[in-house]
Image (cartoon, grey):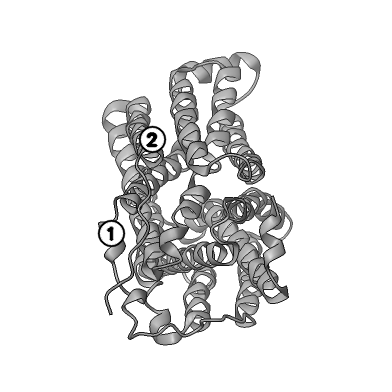
Amino acid sequence: MFSFLKRLDRSGKVLLATCFFAFFCNGSLSLMLGSAMPDLKATYGLSDSLSGIFLSAHSAGNLIAGLISGLVPLWLGQRKSILLLSSLAFIGFVMMLLWGNPMWLFVAFLFTGLGRGSVTNFDNRMVNQLSGGSPAASNLLHSSFAIGAILTPMIFLLLRTHISWQAGVGYMVVIGCISLFNFSRMRLANDHPDRGDKQNSTLIFLKNPSFLILAMMMFCYLCSEYAINGWLVTYIQNKENLAAALLASGSDAISYSQTMATLLWVVMLVGRLICAALSAKVSQKIMMMVSSFGVAIFYFLMLSSATIPMVTFSVAGLGLCMAGICPMIYSDAAIFTNAYPMATSLLLGIGSAGAILMPTMVGTLAERFGFNGGMSAIFVTILLLVVFATLNVVVKTRPPVPAQK
């Protein structure tokens, strides 16, 4: 599982650790927004609709970062560009502590998305380059994200209980500053890409069917992941048959739904470690296809189940099957991302478009058809994920071609 480390010298290992810690911060950031939102609403008197707009601003920032973070290094260099762009996330959290003006907070949430997306782009591309596209390295990188996502709600709750919610947000700023310090000490072999080299800005890979299949897999996966993460708690709390079963067992829907959200991430962490271990023996294309079928099966079980054991089993199975798909898409795309800097940006940008689209669609459909109807829309994107994951196995990968000088 750790064989890729043997190929790295000391500076390479330090750079890898820098990327892992930055991704831990990204996981912390993603869960901090949800943890702090109730206190932001109460402190600044925000409405539900405004809060939803702020979360959309974060997703929009994430999308914008996917489109620009591959170009900024052509002018500033890789180290300066990631320092500038990633710092926006933690500037955004400081802004949240200072003022509750809606436009001010909109910009703050936009900044968090820009910072998060830039780190996602840089880390995935750098880890692919350092490891030669190792799926084990990619899964371990995304495991660090899961660790941050699991720990942050507990850390926030502890600091909020004993100090204040502002202290919880302050924790995010502190670890962000540590990440920026790590980035500032990086030594990169190709820190200033040649602007005259068309290979650094070309989009020729968009003509390659293999890349387009992976891009559509990323779109469908992030459609599903963001919508499930965003609506799972609300869906469980509104599932009438399950609510009756919880009441009969002496439990309550609120506690159970939060437990299921935590369970999903814990199992995803375990799943990513399992995928990292299996990657040396099993083709990642096969693992992604099998995992996609598993996601479809367990998601269907979750929608159709109304008993506590079956819903719990379905959520655990769903997390286990979802775990390795995103890391392995990045790893499988290494043949493109290592050749074309813009490939990572487009992969992230296309996926982020799905992350914006599906949560909104679920909410809109839920208002008209109820949460079962809204959540059923996610099943369509999961079925499309199965189709594209199967094509990824069947269609022979075409190697990238050099850009014309």
Q: Which of pointers 1 and 2 lies earlier in the amino acid sequence? A: 1
Q: Mark 1 = which residue?
A: 206
Residue 61 visible in the shown view: no
Residue 129 location, x and y as percent? 54, 66
Q: Residues within 10 Å of mark 2 (few under 14, many from 20)?
A: some
Please tell me whether residue 145 is drawn above or below residue 238 in the rendered image: below
On the image, which quarter does residue 383 sit in? top left
Name the mark on residue 61.
none
**What is the CA distance from the residue labelled 1 to the residue labelled 2?**
20 Å
Which residue is drawn at the image coordinates 27% and 65% (left, top)? 204
Badge 2 amino acid: Thr
Which quarter of the rendered picture does the C terminus lie within?
Answer: bottom left
Residue 223's quadrant in the figure? top left
Measuring from the top left, give residue 117's x and y in whole percent.
45, 64
Q: Which residue is mark 2?
A: 390
Percent position of residue 381, x then y: 34, 36
165 shown above or below 212? below
Q: Amino acid at mark 1?
A: Leu
Callout 1 environment at 10 Å: few (<14), some (14 to 19), or many (20+)? few
Question: Residue 155, image x and y in percent?
Answer: 69, 54
Secondary structure state at the residue bearing disc 1? helix
In terms of secondary structure, where does tag 2 sit?
A: helix
